[in-house]
Image (cartoon, rainbow, N blue to C red):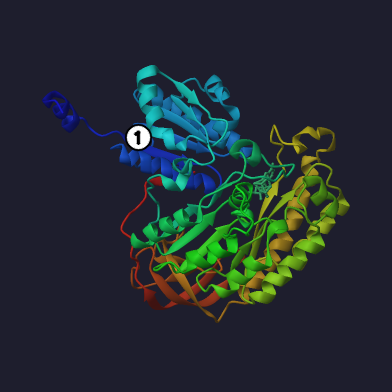
């Protein structure tokens, strides 16, 4: 290298970056990858927008308020950029994939827009935009056999070193009438089994003790790998199935907890339930999105199951794992939802006895089938009323489930001081419940401890520290902030 370059490189202050993530876990995962690429490019994490050289807004378009949040945040960033014109603004993620040039049309001060299929190009594109000016690059789809394009194959910085997300599959082959994911994430592609295991082993070697396997429809993991082998002339069933993956990841040395999200109820197989039951590392938690309790609405959504079938699958899972926590997603006000349909949802919610649930108000996403059914949209006041009634049913069962845990000793992993009271620590149980407890000892994030549950509320438990069971082993801290 020429001496001049060397001088420039050694005196130039590294650029700082800040990532704000909107939306789902998959998106937070992409944010980790973007952060990893930026660190690999010599950038450093900034702590706030006022000082960051590069601000990345990694967006989600699954629900309507994500748009409002993005354009609201962009408005605020514009005033920062007016004061500090050198600041670079980047928009990535699903909303970028969907709105493409529309983002820079609405917010021309944005420097770079890229989509969900070119996360791996984040820093290359940033460099190009510095030379060529504002840039939008959206790829239509991922190249199936290009391992480098999978987010997990890229360097990652993680915001809590003891746990990590591992993408096992991208895209979705279903066509739920409300959902934008197939349009923006493309067809389902599974990551090869051995590479996933190698990645988990690498994470465990870095001190990660908990992994969450991510995919839009994890139970169809491997389906494309199987088909690919058959097309190549093979006759035998080609493993792996998702169940095999659960067992293998649980067996990786150093991994104490395995979680996954989300299974589609229509594809939840007995093998998966058995693998959960027989692998102690797989947490006693099943997130099984039901969306509605009405068979008519489920059919209109193209979900591929009835309320009865869903409850049967749930019963089978609970029979295999008596201490299973179950959570769900429910959409209120899907187009055409009648009072009768909604009563069915209330009945199902009561019968399923959920530990907790995410309730969503239906929001039309342009490009989805249901968005075309404007003549059947439900009145907002009706939706609000239904939403509140459902909340009562869901909170009732959540509280009952939580109260049933009082007096038990549960292992938690420490997540840090409680947001409300820093003298109180928060930990998460295998069932994914938060427990707040006072502790004279300050315990590092990622420490495992036993806690006696002494109190319950619909969204958390209270407890007392009993003993520390395992020390945290990870080294890194992450620079990704959630929005
Ligand atoms: N409107 C409301 N909720 C939605 N979800 C997905 N798309 C929509 C939409 N258009 C919810 C579903 C899904 C969760 C991740 O987000 O319940 O399971
Ligand atoms: Fe969307 Fe349905 Fe695929 Fe889930 S299964 S990502 S809701 S299309």
| Residue 96 position in % (x across, y down) | 55, 31
Foreground residue among 98 and 417: 98
Give the residue drawn at x 58%, y 23%: 102
- Tell me where residue 447 sits by quadrant: bottom left
Question: Is residue 170 shown left or right of residue 194?
Answer: right
| Residue 197 position in % (x across, y down) | 45, 59
Q: How many other residues sit within 10 Å of disc 1, few (<14), some (14-19) or many (≥20)?
A: many
Question: Is residue 405 shown left or right of residue 438?
Answer: right
| Residue 191 position in % (x across, y down) | 52, 50
Position of 465 relative to 260 (above/below) = below
Mark 1 secondary-structure assignment: loop
Q: Which residue is mark 1?
A: 52
Q: Is residue 315 visible?
A: yes
Position of 438 relative to 309 (above/below) = below
Q: How many numbered callouts?
A: 1
Foreground residue among 219 and 335: 219
Give the residue drawn at x 75%, y 35%: 371
| Residue 142 position in % (x across, y down) | 54, 37
Farthest residue, direction right: 340
- Tell me where residue 392 sits by quadrant: bottom right
Q: Quadrant of the N terminus?
A: top left
Position of 135 relative to 222 (above/below) = above
Farthest residue, direction bottom: 407
Give the residue drawn at x 56%, y 36%: 94
Question: Is residue 290 shown left or right of residue 307?
Answer: left
């Amino acid at each position: 290298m020429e001496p001049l370059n060397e001088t420039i490189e050694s005196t130039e202050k590294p650029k700082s970056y800040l990532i704000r993530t909107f939306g789902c876990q998959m998106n937070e995962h992409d944010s980790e990858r973007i952060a990893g690429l930026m660190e690999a490019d010599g950038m450093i994490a900034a702590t706030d927008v006022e000082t960051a050289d590069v601000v990345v807004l990694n967006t989600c378009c699954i629900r309507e308020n994500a748009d409002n949040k993005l354009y609201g945040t962009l408005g605020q960033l514009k005033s920062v950029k007016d004061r500090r014109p050198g600041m670079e603004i980047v928009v990535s993620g699903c909303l970028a994939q969907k709105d493409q040039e529309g983002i820079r049309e609405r917010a021309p001060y944005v420097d770079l827009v890229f989509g969900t299929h070119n996360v791996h190009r984040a820093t290359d594109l940033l460099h190009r935009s510095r030379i060529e000016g504002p840039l939008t690059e959206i790829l239509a789809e991922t190249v199936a056999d290009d391992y480098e394009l999978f987010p997990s194959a890229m360097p990652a910085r993680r915001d809590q070193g003891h746990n990590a997300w591992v993408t096992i599959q991208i895209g979705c082959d279903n066509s739920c009438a409300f959902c934008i994911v197939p349009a923006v994430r493309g067809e389902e592609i599974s990551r090869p089994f051995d590479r996933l295991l190698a990645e988990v082993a690498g994470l465990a070697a870095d001190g990660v003790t908990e992994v969450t396997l991510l995919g839009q429809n994890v139970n169809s993991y491997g389906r494309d790998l199987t088909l690919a082998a058959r097309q190549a002339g093979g006759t035998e069933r080609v493993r792996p199935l998702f169940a095999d993956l659960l067992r293998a990841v649980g067996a990786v040395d150093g991994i104490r907890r395995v979680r996954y999200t989300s299974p589609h109820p229509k594809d939840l197989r007995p093998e998966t339930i058995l693998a959960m039951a027989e692998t102690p590392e797989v947490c006693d938690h099943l997130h099984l999105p039901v969306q509605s309790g009405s068979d008519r609405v489920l059919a209109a959504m193209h979900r591929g199951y009835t309320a009865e079938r869903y409850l049967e699958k749930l019963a089978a899972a609970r029979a295999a794992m008596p201490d299973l926590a179950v959570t769900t997603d429910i959409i209120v006000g899907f187009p055409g939802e009648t009072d009768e349909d909604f009563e069915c949802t209330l009945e199902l919610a009561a019968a399923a006895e959920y530990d907790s649930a995410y309730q969503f108000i239906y929001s039309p996403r342009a490009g989805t089938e249901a968005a075309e059914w404007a003549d059947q949209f439900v009145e907002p006041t009706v939706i609000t009323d239904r939403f509140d009634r459902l909340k009562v049913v869901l909170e009732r069962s959540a509280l009952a489930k939580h109260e049933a845990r009082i007096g038990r000793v549960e292992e938690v992993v420490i997540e840090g001081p409680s947001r409300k009271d820093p003298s109180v620590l928060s930990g998460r149980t295998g069932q994914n419940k938060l427990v707040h407890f006072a502790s004279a000892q300050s315990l590092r994030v990622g420490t495992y401890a036993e806690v006696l549950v002494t109190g319950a509320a619909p969204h958390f438990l209270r407890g007392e520290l009993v003993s520390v069971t395992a020390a945290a082993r990870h080294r890194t801290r992450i620079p990704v902030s959630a929005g």
